[in-house]
Image (cartoon, rainbow, N blue to C red):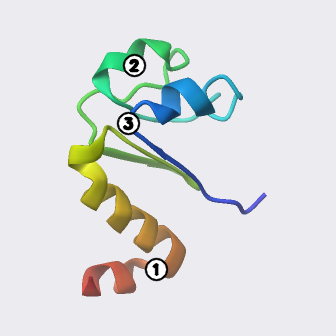
Amino acid sequence: ADAVIAAICAAPAVVLAPLGLLDGAAATCHPAFADKLPGGCSEDRVVVSKDGKLVTSRGPGTAIEFALKLVELLCGAATEEKT
């Protein structure tokens, strides 16, 4: 579908992964939970990962970058650049 799926901190590993929403996708999460991501999914040292309509981020310290990526995805790059 066209739904955007977004998760930050531990949520990609403890919520999205068990639901199979990360299968075959690139994602990141809090480093303490990276071992719970599906194989080949983890993007180490990536602050915000965008794979299609899936956006994940490492944690609270990356919340601004995470929010800007969501604005870009939902409203377009021109809007994100204005913020």
Name the residue: 23% across, 31% down: 45
At horizontal 49% and vertical 80% (from top left) the residue drawn is 75
Give the x, y percent position of residue 62. Answer: 25, 49
Amino acid type at circle 3 is Cys
Examine the rendered structure and indicate whether residue 31 appears above or below residue 76. Answer: above
Q: Residues within 10 Å of mark 1 (few under 14, many from 20)?
A: few
Residue situated furthest right in the rendering? 1
Q: Which mark is residue 76?
A: 1
Per the image, the residue denoted by label 3 is 9
Q: CA distance from mark 2 to mark 1?
A: 31 Å
Numbered tag placed on residue 33 in the rendering: 2
Between discs 2 and 3, the one toward the N terminus:
3
In the image, 54 versus 62, the foreground residue is: 62
Q: Between marks 2 and 3, how big is the CA–CA gap?
A: 8 Å
- In the image, residue 73 sits, relative to residue 63, either above or below, namely below
Amino acid on which the number 1 mark rests in the picture: Gly
What residue sits 44% from the left and 65% below the top?
70
Residue 9 position in % (x across, y down): 38, 36
- State the SS at label 3: loop
- Check the picture and name the quadrant holding the N terminus: bottom right
